[in-house]
């Protein structure tokens, strides 16, 4: 019986550990979008991974590891924000740090830097919506759950962000 109990306990942790190599860059990108600061983003991701492994028994095997860890990261960020009593992010992140550069396509890198600069200038709630929905491909429903917002609020934030980005990029 103890062997079965240990197997069931280790299964969530094994699934989390197996997902980390692919998930870590995505967590880092999201943490950078929240903090605007590479060292703080790295600390946030490391803390997220540590919390996920400590709370592995709370993870339901077979569900979305990425959504679960994005939620942990977001909650940790909120706790930091509350502790510092800060409402907005800290500014732009150099494109080289966001992992959007491509030595094979300098034009794409240049455009990526421009777009990232505009995304990072958005208010935090809009910036989160853009990163989670457009970059990470998370559904509106999951983003709403992750951020404790209504789905309509997420859609509204994304629409406002898209309008601002189109305006700033000079698109009709």
Image: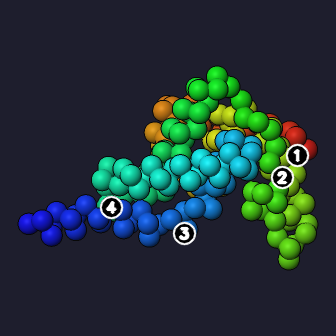
Q: Which residue is mark 2?
A: 94
Contact? badges 2 and 3 (CB < 8 Å): no
Q: Which of the marked residues, 4 or 1, is nearer the chain's N terminus? A: 4
Q: Which residue is mark 3?
A: 21
Q: Is residue 5 left or right of residue 153?
A: left
Q: CA distance from mark 1 to mark 3?
A: 34 Å
Q: Which of the marked residues, 1 or 2, is nearer the chain's N terminus? A: 2
Query: Mark 1 packing: few (<14 Cα in 10 Å), some, or many (20+)?
Result: few
Residue at the image point whose x is 50% and y is 55% from the top: 49
Q: Secondary structure at mark 2?
A: loop
Residue at the image point whose x is 75% and y is 57% from the top: 98
Indicate which disc residue 169 carries. 1
Q: Which of the marked residues, 2 or 3, is nearer the chain's N terminus? A: 3
Q: CA distance from mark 4 to mark 1?
A: 44 Å
Q: Is residue 67 visible?
A: no
Residue at the image point whose x is 77% and y is 62% from the top: 100
Q: Which residue is mark 4?
A: 12
In-front residue for pair 96/153: 96
Q: CA distance from mark 1 to mark 2?
A: 18 Å
Q: Is residue 166 left or right of residue 7?
A: right
Q: Which of the marked residues, 4 or 3, is nearer the chain's N terminus? A: 4
Q: Which of the marked residues, 2 or 4, is nearer the chain's N terminus? A: 4
Q: Secondary structure at mark 3?
A: helix
């Amino acid at each position: 019986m103890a062997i079965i109990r240990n197997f069931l306990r280790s299964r969530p942790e094994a699934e989390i550990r197996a997902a980390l190599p692919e998930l870590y860059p995505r967590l880092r990108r999201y943490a950078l979008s929240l903090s605007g600061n590479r060292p703080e983003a790295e600390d946030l991701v490391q803390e997220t991974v540590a919390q996920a492994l400590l709370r592995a028994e709370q993870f339901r095997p077979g569900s979305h590891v990425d959504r679960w860890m994005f939620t942990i990261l977001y909650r940790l960020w909120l706790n930091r924000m509350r502790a510092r009593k800060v409402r907005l992010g800290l500014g732009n992140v150099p494109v080289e740090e966001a992992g959007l550069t491509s030595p094979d396509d300098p034009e794409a890198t240049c455009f990526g830097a421009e777009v990232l600069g505009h995304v990072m200038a958005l208010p935090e709630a809009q910036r989160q919506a853009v990163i989670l929905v457009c970059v990470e491909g998370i559904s509106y429903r999951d983003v709403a759950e992750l951020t404790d917002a209504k789905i309509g609020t997420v859609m509204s934030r994304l629409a406002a962000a898209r309008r601002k980005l189109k305006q700033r990029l000079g698109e009709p």
